Amino acid sequence: MITFPNAKINLGLNIVQKRPDGYHNLETIFYPIPLEDALEITELKNANEKFRLHQAGIKISGEATENLVIKAYNLLDSLYHLPPLEIHLMKQIPSGAGLGGGSADAAFMLKLLNKKYILSLTDDELEELASKLGADCAFFIKNKPTYAEGIGNSFSPISISLAGYKLWLIKPNIFVSTRDAFARIIPHQPQYCLKETIQLPIREWKDKLINDFEESVFVKFPFIQEIKQEMYKQGALYASMSGSGSSVYGLFPAKVQPPENLFGKGTFEFKSILQ
């Protein structure tokens, strides 16, 4: 069986409070986008191992056991004693980009195993399991525009559609440590209510729909800020860094064609009309 885990972008990201446990309370809107990995599973016959992971596409560092796909498999295996699997993962979503690629892979693995082995887990049950793998993993279970709060794991549906707009996504060859990004944040209550701002016309989002991580990340990595500024020069209605970076996206009218390979070698570029 095969599935296609998709990425997400953040529409606004406010860090509102430091928690006693060291984490931060935030508010953001997760929005799914059609940049996809591919994930396929087949059963291993006469194997002495629980799994074999084959990876292609964008290289992922680290041991296979640290891959969230394997952690998702191990989690369900501990509950349902699944058979050994051969797992093929084609990575197209850049890592360390604020796009949720690893989280999506984990959530889609849970859904794929649930379907293949008829485990009859509900979406709510899958969300609870996914939350054990990462704060935003659970979003990808229902995979619909979602208002998230808490540490990014408390969800409520929100009515927002970007259908018909062109998305231009740039991922520079820059690694932004999420831990470092949080360390430079001063929590505060946002000037504009996120739920109200998101209902305004996109042209009015520019100075109201804020990603709090930008202020500190742009100081350390000014090239990321340059990408955002160039988005607006090219006609974006709205542009923002996604998550804690380092990717930047722009939303354009469908008739506007962003230039090809504007930032050249060393950047990942993705363009799509949102559905």
Image: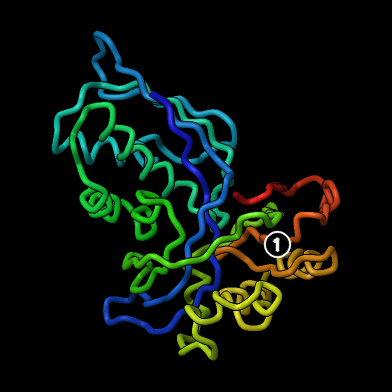
In the image, farthest residue toward the top: 46
Position of residue 153 measured from the top left corner of the image (x, y, whole percent) = 33, 64
What colour scheme governs how the chains and residues are painted in the rendered image of this protein?
rainbow
Identify the residue at image location x=51%, y=73%. Answer: 13
Local crowd at mark 1 within 10 Å, few (<14), some, or many (≥20)? many
Q: Which residue is mark 1?
A: 250
The location of residue 267, given as percent across then percent down, is 73, 49
Looking at the image, residue 102 sits to the left or right of residue 223; the answer is: left
Q: Quadrant of residue 157?
A: bottom left
Three-letter amino acid code at disc 1? Answer: Gly
- Depth order, front residue of 5/262: 5
Q: Nearer the viewer, residue 183 or 190?
A: 190
Image position of 83 with respect to 126: above or below? above
Point out residue 191 in the picture as x, y percentages from the top left corner: 54, 91
In the shown orientation, is residue 86 left or right of residue 247?
A: left
Residue at the image point whose x is 14% and y is 33% from the top: 80
- The x, y position of residue 50, in whole percent, is 25, 24
Query: Based on the displayed image, in which of its 4 quarters is residue 77 positioned?
Result: top left
Q: Quadrant of the N terminus?
A: top left
Vertical side of 271 occupied by 70: above or below:
above
Task: Say which of 241 and 71 sits in front.
Answer: 241
Would you say 247 lies left or right of 192 here? right
Q: Residue at x 63, y 66 (%)?
A: 241
Identity of the residue drawn at 71% across and 54% down: 166
**Quick one: SS at disc 1?**
strand
Number of numbered discs: 1
Say which of 7 and 142 sits in front.
142
Depicted 62 relative to depicted 252: above or below: above
